[in-house]
Amino acid sequence: MINLVYIGSDIGDITVNAFNAITESDIVLNYDNIDLSILDEYLKDKEIISNVVEDSEDGDIYSKLEESYSKIEYCVYKSREDKTVTIVSSNNPNIYTVANVLIQISSKHNDIELRVYPGVSPVDYSASLLGAPLNDYAAIDLNSIIVSQEELEGKIKSALENDFVLFIHNLKGIYGEDENHNFNLLKKIVNDFNNELLVGIVNGESHEICRFKDINDEKINEKTTLIIGNRLTHILDDFMVTSSDYIVKPKFIEQNMDFFKRYLKGETPRGLDMDCDYLPCHKELEACDFCYCPFYPCADGVTGGEWIKEKNVWSCQFCDWIHLEEPCLAVREGLDEILEETEDLKTKHIELLKLRRQSLLKTLK
Ligand code: SF4
């Protein structure tokens, strides 16, 4: 039997199944040479193989890989002798990099019993330190050995263009001559796209959140991981959060319903209402089309709304987005298809929130 166990970024996060697989083994291969001392008392009677691979003098990548793969070959060989072998891996964004190699090597034989135990990947580990930055995301290894610069560039660009949150791993090259080459490529692509995107920088247990334009080489080392937010990513109480589904039942006050009664009859203002006594009610104000917001309470701070602490009330005081011309146009377009009567504000709240998200993606920079 051969097990592949993924430890992840912190051995304290090991799963019960992974722990059992290790402790029930005869042989343990520490593939990424991580500190297993926390498991010392369970490893006493086992053959432990480390995977320290010396740099060859001529820097020959084949010898390095061959030496490393030979340890896996050895495990496969031992498992065929009825030994229970566990390979412990940790360094990659997820277990599947090593799993891929192991499955390839095992497939050279007929009778290999193989089981893969997932763990908390660096993606989840980093995201949990930062808060809730992940929604739909892409995980990209900057240092994959046979991925060309063109392919890498294409993946990063298309992830950004399609509003994926990006998880970036292996920022420092270990194969190329210039260790910063791929990181510099990433910086160029993101800076050209939108350097105001938030980025979470995770180094072990420490982390910080800043705008991408403020990232610099000193914040990065070979263990650093990055989570680059999309346009819906914002800061909430020091956490990095990407807008998702927190749906709060709408409560509308009388004035709100009156406003939308008039909206449906085409009697509400378009553009700035110069006769309004409350003008200027917002810092950035271009249009009064939605003096009352059809999405209330959106419960999504990306446009500046926030909960008033201890009151359970959603405040739109700092949301300027719905009062700008472009969003008003985008919202009007979709709203005509959803809103037939004022009751729809309550019964079609989820459809309205979809429209809000669509309009945000059309209009946020
Ligand atoms: S925060 Fe903005 S979008 Fe959300 S409910 Fe308030 S006004 Fe509408």
Image (spheres, rainbow, N blue to C red):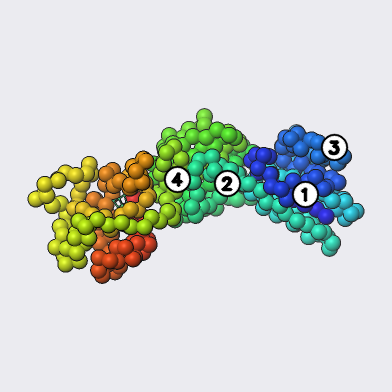
Residue 310, given in percent of the width and then of the height, sits at 37, 41
Q: Position of residue 174 (x, y in %)?
A: 64, 38
Q: Which is more N-terminal, label 2 or label 1?
A: 1
**Marks 2 and 4, the one that precedes in the sequence:** 2
**Residue on which disc 4 sits:** 241
Residue 175: tell me if it is visible: no
Q: Is mark 3 within 8 Å of ligand 1?
A: no
Identity, as a three-letter code, of the amino acid under mark 2: Asp
- Which badge, 3 or 4, comes first in the chain's sequence? 3
Quadrant (top left/top right/bottom left/bottom right) for the N terminus: bottom right
Q: Residues within 10 Å of mark 2 (few under 14, many from 20)?
A: some
- What's the residue type where badge 4 is placed? Val
Q: Are marks 3 and 4 in contact (CB under 8 Å)?
A: no
| Viewer-proximal residue among 85 and 176 | 85
**Nearer to the camera, 87 or 310:** 310
Residue annotated with mark 1? 21
**Amino acid carrying mark 1 in the image:** Ala
- Number of numbered labels in the structure image: 4
Give the spatial CA distance, label 1 vs label 2. 22 Å
